[in-house]
Amino acid sequence: MPAKMSEASDDKHSRQGIGSLEIGLRVLNEIAFSPKPLSLKELSDQLELSSSRLHKYLISLSRMNYIVQVQNARYTLASASLTLGMAALKRIDPMPITFDAATRLNLATDRTVSVAIWNGNMPLIVKWLDSSQVLAVNIRLGSELSPFFSAAGRLFLAHLPHDRQHQIIDDYYQSPKALPRLKGKQLNREEFYTLMEAIKDDNLSCFYGDFLPDINVIASPVFNLSGQIQAVISLMGMASDTDVRPGQRLERLLSATVRGTTKLICGTAV
């Protein structure tokens, strides 16, 4: 058996491809990832290819409309590249990608992690992953959350269109059952609007025992191609060992997770 496995591995690495095609794709990738159009010399230097050899690849890519010359013989992407990219993006299912990211975050932190989507009026929990220390909370898969008293809800609310956001907030504050809190302080309507601006700017919502005593929560959004929130990933744990302050380890891990997930869904960070 070991010999067969070795032979299979050797066969995989010895398979021959089309070298010229691989070079052409390297050229295309270099142009794609550049923040500005590139000249023949710049491409030649970066790819370590002679100008005469490189020029042949550029001609072929131009004929196929993957690249185009602009700004004094500099090269950038053309319509065929855009078509290819859009076709790939249409085949991406964002929720399995988000669920996979949440699972990895749960394993890396051993904290309770959830994924919520907006159901039109409030967040809905569509993924729930317990830590090894199960939290005594009455939230589970399928639970609906308050836009005011959940970290995920505040993120969705902060990113709603202006008119819809003001309608929800103003309606609530006409006769609130309880005032939202931040770090134990009750927030009046003006203070809550200020909080919404900060949450939208930071793409981060933190609870320091504000919803349930002794439980800290931190949440951050995953975006879609339209720049709207696709989902919110939240992390929670006991306040004694779950530091959710910005800049601390758990916040850095969560922020890296949502950025990476957004990049996989959109092809770039939003």
Image: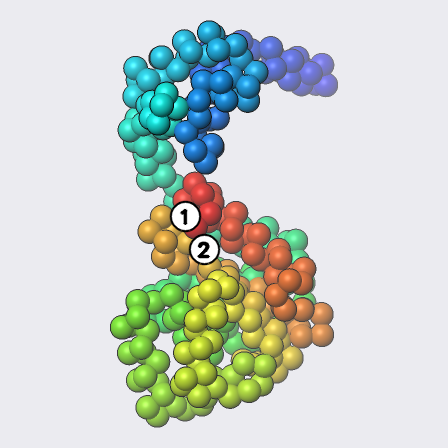
157 in relation to 264, above or below: below
Foreground of the two, 135 or 155: 155
**Residue at point 55%, 22% (across, down):** 46
Amino acid of disc 1: Pro
Q: Residues within 10 Å of mark 2 (few under 14, many from 20)?
A: many
Q: Residue 144, percent across and down?
A: 41, 72
**Total numbered circles:** 2
Is 69 left, or right, of 134 in this rendering? Answer: left
**Residue at point 54%, 81% (across, down):** 182
Q: Earlier in the sequence, mark 1 or mark 2?
A: 1
* Callout 1 touching callout 2 (CB < 8 Å): yes
Tag 2 residue: 222
Q: Residue 265, percent across and down?
A: 42, 45
Is 64 left, or right, of 4 in this rendering? Answer: left
Q: Residue 60, percent across and down?
A: 35, 12
Instruction: State which mark lies toward you, 1 or 2.
Output: 2
Amino acid of disc 2: Val
Tag 1 residue: 94
Q: Which mark is residue 82?
A: none
Under tag 1, what secondary structure?
A: helix
Residue 143 visible? no
243 in relation to 72, above or below: below
